[in-house]
Amino acid sequence: MKGRADRLHVVVDMAKQTEDESAARLDKKRQALNDEQQRFGDLKEYYAEYDVSFKKASNVMRAEDFAAKRNFLHQLALSCELQGSQVELMQQEFDAAINEWRLCHLKYERLQGYVAQLEKEELARIDKQEQKSVDEWVSQVYFRK
């Protein structure tokens, strides 16, 4: 007959699988966050470069070109704000994924510890039972003499 520890190994395996799945989701969220941060950095860099070139050329531009480029710069600024919001959202999703993984990891570790404790207790019970059997055998042999 299987002991409690043996029966709980299935639960530990399921907890490990859940932890692994959570780690995979965390990795995807990390990669998505890195991608969004990269896009945000690229967009800010492009905005800064365009702003510098716009300021240098603004004295020699016609009014129509000036208004069009100013409008484009404004659109870039809005895009930067939007991308910044996207990065914040991805950061929140990443933080949630970290918390989920931590909970799964903690559950897995606790289950492992509990099963290890049960195995230790079962071994101690078996050792005690064997010792009792040996003691009974010795006392039977001793009293037969």
Image (cartoon, rainbow, N blue to C red):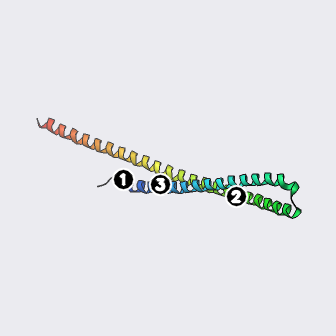
Mark before the other along the chain sequence, 2 or 1? 1
Q: Position of residue 69 (x, y in %)?
A: 81, 61
- Foreground mark, 1 or 3, reads 3
Q: Residue at x 18, y 40 (%)?
A: 137
Sooner in the amino-acid sequence: mark 3 or mark 2: 3
Query: Is 29 rendered above or below residue 128?
Result: below
Name which residue lies at 36% across and 53% down. Answer: 4
Q: Quadrant of the N terminus?
A: bottom left
Residue depicted at x 77% and y 62%: 75
What is the quadrant of residue 90 in the picture?
Answer: bottom right
Amino acid identity at mark 1: Arg
The residue at which mark 1 appears reads as 4
Q: For the C terminus, which image quadrant? A: top left
Foreground: disc 3 or disc 2? 2
* Residue 88 in picture, x, y percent from top left: 68, 55
Q: Which one is nearer the viewer's eye here, 89 or 132? A: 89
Contact? badges 1 and 3 (CB < 8 Å): no
Q: Which amino acid type is marked by label 3?
A: Asp
Residue on which the image places disc 2: 83
State the CA–CA distance, disc 1 to disc 3. 24 Å
Q: Which residue is mark 3?
A: 20
The answer to which quarter of the image holds residue 13 is: bottom left
Q: Secondary structure at mark 1?
A: helix
Residue 132 locus on image (x, y percent): 25, 41
Q: At numbered mark 3, what does the secondary structure look like: helix, strand or loop?
A: helix
Give the quarter of the image for residue 92: bottom right
**Residue 91 image point, x, y percent:** 64, 54
State how far apart marks 2 and 1 are (Cα).
53 Å
Disc 2 secondary structure class: helix
